[in-house]
Amino acid sequence: MYSIYGVKVGQSPNWFQSGIQPVYRSDVGRDQPVHYTIWVLKGDKRLILVETAFDTEVTSPWPRNAATYGTEQSLAEAGVDTSKVTDVIITHMHVDHFTGYTKFPNAKFYVQRKELDHCLSSVNVFPKVFGFPLRAAQDTIALMRHWRLEAVEGDNELFPGLKVILAGGHTPGLQMLAVETNKGTAFMTSDNAYLYHNLKENLPVGYYCNLVEAAKAIQTAKKSVSSEDMIIPGHDYALWGEKKVVQIF
């Protein structure tokens, strides 16, 4: 069983400035603040992080006009010492989810092989379109050489009570998570549902590589839980408000 915490490490004023449309063919949520999150899963014997958020030294000049709170400082408020983190699951390799790898010197990262292949392929000669800087690609190869990055093959129970599900949609190899908690199975959609609105109205996000997969991912999330209030969208401001650390379940 895990307790799930959300830790906000940065925030942009709105989706419009971030350049991302949170709902497919809709302006819903465009003016809502966008937070950048690291999820903390605390179990009896294990602590696992989901995402690393970003390091501005890797991603500069992105994100523009964003408030940044500091990864180490923000996680410390949740009782997490970044130097002692050993396991980090990466749902996908967009800069706000993965480029903070620099903050976790002793961690091993878990990424779907399909996502890894995409981000290291020639398609990313267009980093502004596909969201993966050259330095991040070079550092990823270094992590692989030092056995600090594991390529996951499809659906997999990585740890007891924690399963990853290969979904694609938002990116080619995005993985969602099913996490056992005291309240039942929680399901983390990552960016296949930015907002609760995506889930409620069955509307995929407006930034995707495969619209069919993005739509199916929402249905997968709903079929994986006994109650839809156990689904955690990737970036909904309603989860935090002005707080930096919240316990979700």
Image (spheres, helix red, strand yellow):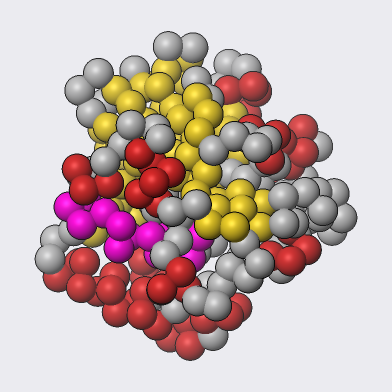
Question: Residue 178 vs residue 160: left or right?
Answer: right
Above or below, 69 against 76 in this view is below
Quadrant of the snapshot with the N terminus? top left
Q: Is residue 40 magenta?
A: no
Q: Is residue 96 magenta?
A: yes
Q: Say if 4 sits above or below 23 in the image.
A: above
Residue at 47% from the left image edge and 73% from the top image edge = 59
Residue 160 location, x and y as percent?
26, 26
Q: Is residue 249 visible?
A: yes
Please give the name of the residue rendered at 53% of the width and 57% of the height, measured from the top-left corner: 68
Task: Give the total number of marks visible in the rendering.
Answer: 0
Where is residue 199 drawn, in percent x and y?
A: 71, 36
| Residues in magenta, as a range | 95-108
Q: Is residue 187 visible?
A: no
- In the shown orientation, is residue 131 left or right of residue 236? left
**Residue 97 in the image, given as x and y percentages of width and height:** 46, 56
Dominant SS in magenta: helix
